Image (cartoon, rainbow, N blue to C red):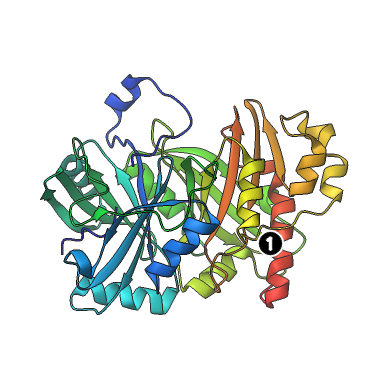
């Protein structure tokens, strides 16, 4: 079953010598696209254009030959989101998307990865035990050729492997260039996908970490267990896997025992199983990003004023004054390599599932360990409002 509905080369933070890529059994070029299955792709595209400042660049639908699905491709810097909804299911793929939205609500079905050789990547992954979903095949148009393949990962999520060397179309064959839906913001809100976080069932985190170790040759980057991620009421465990160049980073969470229901438990219940919990978006000016997004209606988690009373004592000086951090409710974390600024949105759909993180890095390649307690207490306050704590 060939699928061309899912899939700019993501430029990520960090540089690694080319020798690291040459030694990598599963080399990657970056995230190709975050692909969403949604109930109404036209409305989703308008929301992300307006609220996230993204730009519509390509479209596939009945007007250009796609009778079953409509897909809108939006970009911001190297980050690319694809929103697909079903018009009338007529194939296994259309029926799958229809059932996916019915069971999970709007969610991420594909973390598409750009690779230099899709055939080799697919052969290596399946040779190491990955479940193949779409065998390597070419799709062509007047702009060139794209090679696609796909493998399964946790839940119903997939990784489409995209080889687009030399392709100069707006996205891929089957799509045509599209005009922006709204007037562009003066400054874009983010430049790249920093990392993609998955939630899996209790006891399965190590299984999926092992999957990425074996199937993609990813290595373990960070680990957070026990008191690292615990509050009075709930806890979780997390490990981070990444490719050799640190362009693709996948934290994987599982719930841990606690007095009440953790955010991971809530996600698994309302999503109906394992899936992508949040996408972290890299910005070089988080203050402007958050102000623009708030003005456009994006809701962010609140941080109590008490967080900032002693912040300077342990986080040190940052490029953003503490008064501004307090005003915008931004979090700070510092490690041996530098510091980062971050903030998290509330869920962006009615189900308490997918949300986003804005992150500005200054040397640190961490994930905000020093903020976990404050962050999860903020999430618990929202869970309590929903009656799900």
Write down the quadrant of residue 231 in the picture.
bottom right
Q: Quadrant of the N terminus?
A: bottom left
**In the rendering, at what x and y percent does residue 121 appear?**
22, 42
**Residue 88: x, y in percent?**
25, 80
Along the viewing direction, whichever of 228 and 82 lies nearer the viewer = 82
* In the depicted structure, whether residue 297 falls above or below residue 162: below
What residue sits right under mark 1 in the picture? 379
Element type at mark 1: helix
Q: Is residue 368 visible?
A: no
Q: Is residue 126 left or right of residue 339?
A: left
The quadrant holding residue 216 is top left
The answer to which of 184 and 348 lies nearer the viewer is 184
Picture residue at 56% right of the left edge, 43% below the top: 223
Residue 189 in percent (x, y) is at: 55, 45
Which quadrant of the figure contains the C terminus?
bottom right
Circle 1 crowding by C-alpha within 10 Å: few under 14, some 14–19, many from 20: some
Q: Is residue 11 above or below residue 295?
A: above
Tell me what residue is drawn at x 61 percent, y 45 percent.
Answer: 289
| Picture layout, residue 148 above or below residue 297 | above
Residue lying farthest to the front in this orientation = 183
Residue 316 sits above or below residue 66 on the image: above
The answer to which image quadrant residue 89 occupies is bottom left
What percent of the width, then of the height, locates residue 353?
A: 54, 67
């Amino acid at each position: 079953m060939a699928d061309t509905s899912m899939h700019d080369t993501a430029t990520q933070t960090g540089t690694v010598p080319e020798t690291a890529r040459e030694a990598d059994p599963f080399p990657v070029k970056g995230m190709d696209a975050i692909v969403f299955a949604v109930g109404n792709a036209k409305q989703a595209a308008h929301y992300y254009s307006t609220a996230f400042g993204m730009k519509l660049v390509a479209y596939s639908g009945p007007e250009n030959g796609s009778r079953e699905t409509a897909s809108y491709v939006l970009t911001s810097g190297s980050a690319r989101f694809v929103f697909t909804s079903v018009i009338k299911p007529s194939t296994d793929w259309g029926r799958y998307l229809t059932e996916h939205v019915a069971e999970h609500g709007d969610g991420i079905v594909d973390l598409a990865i750009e690779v230099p050789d899709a055939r080799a990547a697919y052969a290596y992954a399946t040779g190491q035990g990955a479940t193949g979903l779409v065998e390597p095949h070419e799709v062509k148009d007047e702009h060139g050729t794209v090679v696609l393949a796909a493998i399964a990962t946790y839940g119903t999520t997939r990784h489409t492997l995209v080889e687009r060397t030399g392709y100069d179309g707006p996205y891929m064959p089957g799509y045509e260039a599209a005009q922006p839906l709204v007037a562009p913001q003066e400054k874009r809100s983010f430049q790249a996908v920093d990392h993609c976080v998955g939630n899996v069932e209790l006891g399965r985190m190590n299984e999926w970490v092992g999957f990425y170790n074996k199937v993609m040759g990813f290595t373990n980057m960070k680990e957070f267990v026990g008191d690292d991620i615990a509050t009075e009421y709930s806890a979780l465990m997390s490990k981070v896997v990444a490719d050799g160049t640190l362009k693709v980073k996948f934290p994987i969470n599982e719930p841990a025992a606690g007095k009440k229901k953790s955010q991971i438990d809530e996600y698994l219940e309302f999503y109906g199983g394992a899936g992508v919990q949040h996408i972290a978006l890299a910005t070089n000016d988080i203050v402007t990003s958050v102000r623009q997004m708030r003005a456009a209606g994006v809701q962010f988690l609140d941080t109590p004023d008490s967080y900032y009373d002693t912040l300077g004592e342990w986080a040190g000086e940052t490029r953003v004054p503490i008064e501004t951090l307090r005003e915008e409710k931004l979090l700070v974390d510092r490690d041996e390599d530098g510091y980062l600024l971050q903030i998290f949105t509330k869920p962006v759909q009615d189900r308490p599932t997918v949300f986003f993180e804005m992150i500005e890095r200054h040397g640190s390649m961490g994930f905000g360990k020093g903020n976990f307690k404050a962050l999860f207490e903020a999430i618990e306050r929202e869970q309590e409002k929903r009656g799900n704590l």
